[in-house]
Amino acid sequence: MASSSGNSSGSSLLHNSGSEEDMQLLMDQRKRKRMQSNRESARRSRQRKQKHLDDLMSLVSQLRKDNNQILTSINITTQHFLNVEAENSVLRAQMVELSQRLDSLNEILNYINTSNGIFENDQDLQTNTAASDAFINPLNLIYLNQPIMASPDLFQY
């Protein structure tokens, strides 16, 4: 009996050790699967990160291109503005000059108009001429009695 009980305890040890080995193999297999799954997940994560980085780099490139176009547009607009400002300055100076000339001409007309009576009296005293002679004297011309007025057309080239 002792031998039979020894046998049964020996076979149970063998059976238990076989079961432990199976369990160990099963756990190793699960561990390898988990490691493989983790590797795949890490690879996918690296791919997602790389794609995100590539997308960001592409966006940076596009934004730089847009920024350069905007800067070029700003530079062109600034140059146009400076050109218009320079032209405007020239036109203002011309307007001042023309206004001064107009004032001077109006002053001359006023002087002529106020002095016109004196010239006519002197002329009447000197000679009695026909009406046609009055047109020869520029001081008697009707258009001289009109003030000179500026018009918008005067400032166009």
Image (cartoon, rainbow, N blue to C red):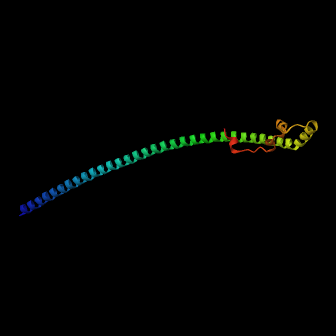
Question: Which quadrant would the N terminus be assigned to in this image?
Answer: bottom left
On the image, the x and y values in percent for residue 81 come to: 62, 42
- Residue visible at 77% across and 41% down in the picture: 102
Say above or below: 13 vs 108: below
On the image, the x and y values in percent for residue 73 come to: 54, 42
Q: How many marks?
A: 0
- In-front residue for pair 17/123: 123
- Residue visible at 9% across and 61% down in the picture: 8
- In-front residue for pair 57/2: 57
Image quadrant where residue 76 sits: top right
Q: Residue furthest right?
A: 125
Say above or below: 136 vs 36: above
- In-front residue for pair 2/70: 70
Question: Which quadrant would the C terminus be assigned to in this image?
Answer: top right
- Residue visible at 92% across and 41% down in the picture: 121
- In-front residue for pair 104/69: 104
Q: Is residue 151 left or right of residue 35?
A: right
Image quadrant where residue 156 sits: top right
On the image, the x and y values in percent for residue 148 come to: 77, 43
Image quadrant where residue 132 sits: top right
Q: Is residue 125 left or right of residue 61?
A: right
Q: Is residue 27 left or right of residue 59?
A: left
On the image, the x and y values in percent for residue 75 come to: 57, 40
- Residue visible at 42% across and 44% down in the picture: 58
